[in-house]
Amino acid sequence: MANIAFLGTGLLGSACAEAAAKRGETVTAWNRSADKARALTPFGISVAETPADAVRGAARVHLVLKDDAVVDEVIAAARPGLAAGAIIIDHSTTLPASTAQRAARLAAEGLRFLHCPVFMTPQAARNAKGSILAAGPRAVFDQVQDALAAMTGRLEYQGERGDLAAAKKLFGNALILSLVGTIADVLTLAQAAGVDGQAAIDVAQLFDLNGMMALRGGNMAKGNFPPSFELAMARKDLGLMLGTAGDRPLAVLPGLAARMDGLIAAGHGADDVSILAKDALAR
């Protein structure tokens, strides 16, 4: 098995490092807060004082860091210790434009780099579940494909466009955050209406949400807005929701109402509610 390094051992990074050690890989870890890295020593993981020390002799260097600025800072700090031919695999959620610039810059400097953001919880990482998106040079991906596949239940290579995995990670997180916010609003409506929260959540069983995403979402992506649910009527229903909630705080519905109001004022009240996507297509 390979010698590898994990730079960044927060909740997700520590879970990934722990799982790698259990698979028999020789792991060295570094974290800005050293106590978090030292907590991994019971799993046979060595702890380094600096990023450069952590990556010495490592064939793969996994980054699980906060943001673009920290990624750039840690890569720079690790450079003196990088072995020839080492592959940097960045699992951090980063800005697509910055990711593209980073990938191009590192390639020009002769470093091998993949951006591989993940959709997984720490427990999923320990159990090799969830998904990993990978973007970067095909030849580099091919060298680590098996190692990445061992980390996850689903590995999706996005191609050589360096920022594509970063963009898709944001798409996925937007769906997750919007869903969480919507669930919170549904529970607020349930509270206001005197209905058990679980009973409100169970209403979702009446819908095929995956089918809705595929059919309605697919049409919206193509700019097809077949009449099904008039925007003005949807706004009327949304008004009923806001009225039911009263002065209770809501996460998603008020912003949706404001967007609908703008489209109705622009003359789209008789269009399907999916007209909400019209300006996304225009750009």
Image (spheres, helix red, strand yellow):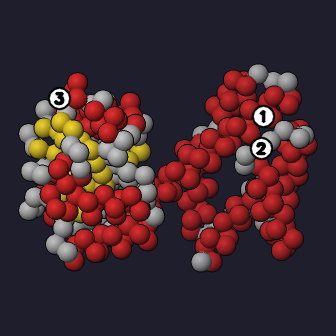
- Mark before the other along the chain sequence, 1 or 3: 3
Q: Are marks 2 and 1 in contact (CB under 8 Å)?
A: yes
Front: mark 1 or 3: 3
Instruction: Residue under label 2, please give it.
Output: 250
The residue that label 1 is drawn on is 188
First reached walking from the N terminus: tag 2 or tag 1? 1
Q: Are marks 2 and 3 in contact (CB under 8 Å)?
A: no
Residue shown at 86% from the left, 59% from the top: 232
The quarter of the displayed image where residue 195 is located: top right
Identity, as a three-letter code, of the amino acid under mark 1 = Thr
> Dot 3, crowdedness within 10 Å: few (<14), some or many (≥20)?
some
Q: Provide the secondary structure element on which disc 2 rests.
A: loop
182 relative position to 245: left or right: left
For label 1, count other residues whose C-alpha is less than 10 Å away and answer few (under 14), some (14-19) or many (20+).
many
Residue designated by label 3: 44
Q: CA distance from mark 2 to mark 1?
A: 7 Å
35 relative position to 257: left or right: left
What is the spatial separation of the Cα atoms under label 2 and label 3, in whole angstroms? 47 Å
Q: Earlier in the sequence, mark 2 or mark 3?
A: 3
